[in-house]
Image (tube, grey):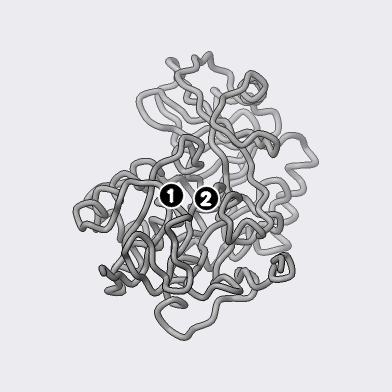
Amino acid sequence: MKSVDYIIVGQGLAGTFLAHDLLEKNQSVLIFDKPHPAMASKVAAGLFNPVGVKRCIRSWKADDFLPVAIERYRFLEKKLRTTFLNIRPIFRLFANEDNRKQWQVKCSNEGMDDFIGDFDPSNTYSYLKDDFGGASISPSGNLEVVKFLDASRLFFKINDCLLEEEFNFDLLELNAGTYKGVQAKKIIFCEGFRAIYNPYFKYLPFSPTKGEVMTIRIPSLEKMDKIVSKGVYIIPLGNHFYRVGATYNHHELDDVVTSEGIAYLQEKIEQILEEEYEIVSKKAGVRPTVRDRKPFLGLHPKYEKLAIFNGLGTRGVLQGPYLSAHFSTFLTTSKKITQESDIQRYIMFLEG
């Protein structure tokens, strides 16, 4: 019988982070992954932003997550011999004068100047409909998620630790920690939103959110060196192309682009851009969001061979590297998981 240290189910962001971490700790890994059309990672903008832009507050553990994320992506770029991290400011356009004053007060009184820099006056950028000015958030930027996942997938294939097939729960031997003749210390589920169909972890309070995005082309705009945020984000992709997103839909868990979603994005673009644009493509995916907006890390309360690393949600690019390092250390040492991330906080939801 073949044996590995860990079986990982899913190669989205969570599974990819964890596989890299465990391999670097000299642990053997076998990943089972069959890409699903609605997986969030394939349409994610990959934003990393330490500030909650609606209320101008630090996002959860931003001071811990941000430096680890940047350092980790730079290391993985060297490891995978490619580039996928773009560090650039996010320019938050203010909706009105009260919004501007709120940010200025919080910036000065609550130490937000760590992340918030220039307060630009209105009409700084001719290509924006800018009546109230804005502020720049930094360090911030975006990860080219598909490029990162594809480069990692090639690495896993070359190192014989990925099988492109769907995980079949009927073939799982729980007590032995065996799947299809492969024995593991732990079988770790990193399935994204599809964890709601996992018979062992579906008790966790996932609240999946469908998001729709567009790629647009702005022929007249030669260069935009910041990500623009006002209701939606607009991310420069190069060569006049931009990514626009995203919508939030809790009712449909599929990859179907809707007329309502695209109309919403177009309405928001009209409130931001002075320039004419054309729609190049439209996509949709489902985020593995959680009711309390905290991730799911830990061992199953009943089955010691099963574990989960999931629920990274809309801030997965920012949170994932730190949480993966934390979880991989838990798996390989006696260090405990922080209580706010540990799935034991939801043990009362487990039936039977």
Q: Secondary structure at mark 1?
A: loop
Find out whether the residues at labels 1 and 2 contact each other: C-beta distance under 8 Å.
yes
Give the residue type at disc 2.
Gly
Determine the image quadrant of residue 62. bottom right
Give the residue type at disc 1.
Gly
- Depth order, front residue of 100/35: 35
Residue at the extreme left of the image, as rendered: 158
Q: Residue at x 52, y 64 (%)?
A: 308
- Asked if residue 298 is positioned above or below residue 333 in the image, the reply reads above
Q: How far across and how far down the image is residue 177, in percent? A: 42, 70
- Asked if residue 220 is positioned above or below residue 328 in the image, the reply reads above
Q: Is residue 309 left or right of residue 201?
A: left
Q: Is residue 157 left or right of residue 122?
A: left
Q: Residue at x 49, y 50 (%)?
A: 140
Q: Earlier in the sequence, mark 1 or mark 2?
A: 1
In this orientation, does residue 121 appear?
Answer: no
Q: Quadrant of the C terminus?
A: bottom right
Gap in angstroms between the C-alphas marked 1 and 2 = 7 Å
In this orientation, does residue 81 appear?
Answer: yes
Q: Quadrant of the N terminus?
A: bottom left
Q: Is residue 191 left or right of residue 53?
A: left
Residue ID for mark 1: 12
Q: How far across and how far down the image is residue 247, in percent? A: 63, 33
- Asked if residue 287 is positioned above or below residue 279 in the image, the reply reads below
Q: How far across and how far down the image is residue 161, in percent? A: 27, 58
- Depth order, front residue of 72/226: 72
Q: Residue at x 30, y 72 (%)?
A: 27
Residue ID for mark 2: 192
- Depth order, front residue of 102/46: 46
Q: How far across and how far down the image is residue 171, in percent? A: 42, 57
Determine the image quadrant of residue 208. top right
Q: Residues within 10 Å of mark 1 (few under 14, many from 20)?
A: many
